[in-house]
Amino acid sequence: MLDGLLCPNAVAVIGASRSPGKVGYAILSNLIKSGYAGKIIPVNPKVNSILNLPCYKNVSEAKIKVDLCIVVVPPPAVMKALESAAAAGAEAVTIITAGFKEVDAAGADHEKKIALYCRKHRMRLLGPNCLGLINTANNMNASFAAQMPKPGSISVLSQSGALCTAILDWSEGRGVGLAKLISIGNKADLSETDLLQALAQDDQTKVIVAYLESISSGPEFIRIAEEVSLTKPLVILKAGTTAAGGKAASSHTGSLAGADIAYGAAFKRAGVVRSENFESLFDFATALSMQPLPKGKRVAIITNAGGPGIMAADAVETLGMELEAPTPEIAQDIMSNLPAAASVGNPIDVLGDAAPDRYAMALEKILADPKVDAVVVILTPQAMSDPDATAEAIIKASTGEKPVLACFMGGSQIINARAKFVAANVPDYPSPERAVAALKAMVDYASWLNRPPRIVTRFPVNRHRVERILSRQARTGRPEIGEVEAKEILRAYDFNVLPGQLARSSDDAIAIADRIGYPVVMKIVSPDILHKSEFGGVKLNLSKSSEVRDAYDLMILRISRKAPSAKLRGVLVEKMGASGREVILGMHRDPQFGPMLMFGLGGIFVEVMKDVSFYLAPLTHSEAIQMLENTRSYALLRGARGEAGVDLNVIASALQQISQLVTDFPQIEEMDINPFIVGEIGTQPVVADARMILSGE
């Protein structure tokens, strides 16, 4: 796949130059110096030879099949260059030239035309406005970057050419090789999904790293990224996620669901290992490329210094992994080979005077412990330390069955040790926190690979009823669906909604209350009042008719004073439900990735604590449970300090029902069920309040 681009037998540089400092010179020079064994064809009508290679007026003049044409001419000359490439039968073109959609509308129009031309002539297009690409498997540096990395197993996609050069410098500085490096530029044709598919099929690539500023198609990206992640780790740094897209949201869910949340939910669904910064991008990639995946999240720490060991232990617990003491037999075995002052808990402190053999002994024995899934080995260079020999001992003791990550702290004294680790495929980190974070990335990826099959449950529902309600709402021209209609929709999707009716007078309210039974709750119904309690529009636990009459009259009076222009539809009189834990269930439809479901504590807590989690629809039961577990309030819901927990499965089912509803009806843009009242196992949850927003389309 994309062999003409990644593995060409002949490359033409259209716009080659014999002037050092010019991009056309740098690319031609890099192809020669990198040792590329294919045919190299400089194209420049003004000269006869460049760098001892014959130069041609156009590609066809060379009279050979050219697979890849690299275009380095000014924007007005690009189309003519493409015509030359097409005439020579090129399979792919890389347009280095800038000055297209990144500049102005005229540039964008020009870019569309060149993309259309390439598509018409079946030439895949990389760029424009890119650095080029590097493939170490065939010694091809078809870029204007100054460095050629050594061969490795990490491949890189970057939407920033400047970041490509930083990555190359990092690669050289750390001695970590790369398989391929591809600058994708403006993505006029080839996008991140095309290149991810190609790298997934590349035998040289073990881990894919990507820096992305935009994603061309959300649903396609999720599908392709998930396919790739099943075979290779995909580590992505996504920039430009701080601003929420689109119009301001009016629901709780919409206000909390920004662009960053959406990308996080998409990456979680697709098994992407997300990096928050450049540093962690390669911390994670090196660990994933060098070590086996852990079978669980139980971590052992070996250290020669108490402080760094505590730092590592704190990081392990903070990131949700586990520290377990060795089995008594292994602990005794380790202790019998250590000084009396040593510690064999977890961390295992081998003391500051630890020689290499002490490290090797501790590592060999702890790796044999069935309770340990991964090991972090820490060294601080002390007067008695031998970092080089210790690194060799750790490398030798590592079996390759469980991941071992090193953390050699310091500078000049550990340079050689770090080089030894890289050569032996043992990732090394300058701080305990970075080592543990890399291990956490491995644990999360392994957990995603071992997740249960994605089985989306379909509930028996009344779609026709919802269609009628939405059709009636559309005729009003109002996007907001109030509580009464929202509850009708939810009832049609098998939610438990207590009996109630809209009253337009105090006598109506009393009649409804008498019919459904006391106690009742009364709530104002107005399309102009979103937060009813702020206007005195909610009354709870009314137990007799006189209270209902007084509540109705007082509610109408308060609203007329606080919101005199609000259009009142009446007052909803509803059966008062049993008490329970209030949670919020919601949905916000992201313009890129579609419906995102939200869960958190309900009532005022969603505004104050913002302790919520998001997941993309459609949702499975296990993913719904994971949403609950990803909140800080999960322990409270499960039951803590003698308090009974709530029925977590009914919350998970409700989230799945919402998932089905918003998948069935894409015109629902946002929704809140707040609060959703849930009790102990065996009780039935209740929709206490709900509202929805329809799209304006």
Image: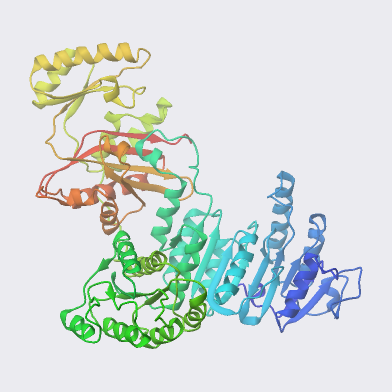
Above-or-below relation of 123 to 680? below
For residue 126, side relative to residue 83 (left or right): left
For residue 351, side relative to residue 582 (left or right): right
For residue 655, side relative to residue 13 (left or right): left
> 670 or 260: nearer the eye?
260
Colour approach in the figure: rainbow
Above-or-below relation of 602 to 146? above
Above-or-below relation of 170 to 391? above
Snapshot quadrant of residue 513: top left
Instruction: Measuring from the top left, give residue 303's x and y in whole percent.
Output: 33, 74
Above-or-below relation of 1 to 493? below
Snapshot quadrant of residue 665: top left
> 583 or 434: nearer the eye?
434
> 6 or 88: nearer the eye?
6
Residue at point 60%, 59% (across, down)? 159
Q: Is residue 669 visible?
A: no
For residue 544, side relative to residue 382 (left or right): left
Instruction: Measuring from the top left, give residue 224's x and y in whole percent.
Output: 48, 64
**Quadrant assignment for the N terminus:** bottom right
Instruction: Measuring from the top left, give residue 353's x and y in whole percent.
Output: 34, 80
Q: Is residue 180 visible?
A: yes
Residue at point 55%, 57% (across, down)? 212
Instruction: Measuring from the top left, give residue 421's x and y in whole percent.
Output: 47, 80
How many numbered marks, from 0 up?
0
